[in-house]
Amino acid sequence: MSNCQDTTENHDTQSLQRPNQHHDTLNGSILESHNGRIDQISSSFDLQDEAISTTSSADGNIPSILADLNRAQDLADSIDSRLDSILSQLGDITAELEQNLSGHNNTKTSEGSQDISKPT
């Protein structure tokens, strides 16, 4: 009987091991799947942390960038004003030259030359 009991005990032990091996394999697959998912989530958090860090860094630069843009706008306005002044002066000079040329062209020399503003 002792042999029979030993066989039963061995049989019970083997039958218990098989489901455990299958259970361990299943748990291993689930664990690997969960670990892969955990790695994905961890990577996602790393990317979010990097994005937040980059955004925070950019946010810190925004006042400096705005100040640079304001200075650039002021410079552009100054250049525009200066160009308007130069164009106005050129208009005045052009008008004066046209007046001088028209007055010069209408005068005749003692030799009787004709007005050079009109073709002969």
Image (cartoon, rainbow, N blue to C red):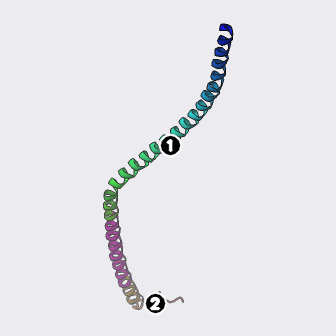
Q: In the rendering, at what x and y percent does residue 46 appear? A: 45, 42
Residue 107, numbered label: none
Q: Which residues are magenta?
A: 72-96
The picture places residue 31, in percent across and down from the top left corner, at: 56, 33
Q: Name the residue tied to disc 1.
A: 41
Task: Determine which quarter of the picture holds residue 106.
Answer: bottom left
Could you tell me the amino acid type at mark 2?
Asp
- Residue 73 picture location, percent across and down: 34, 67
Residue depicted at x 53% and y 41%: 40
Q: Residue furthest front?
A: 1
Describe the element under mark 1 as helix, strand or loop. Answer: helix
Percent from the top left, x then y, of residue 103? 38, 89
Image position of 18 (left or right of 84): right
Q: Left or right of 29: which side holds 51?
A: left
Residue 41 part of the magenta segment? no
Q: Is residue 62 above or below residue 29?
A: below
Graded by Cα atoms within 10 Å as few (under 14), some (14 to 19) or many (20 or more), the crowding at tag 2 reads: some
Where residue 115 is drawn, which disc sits there?
2
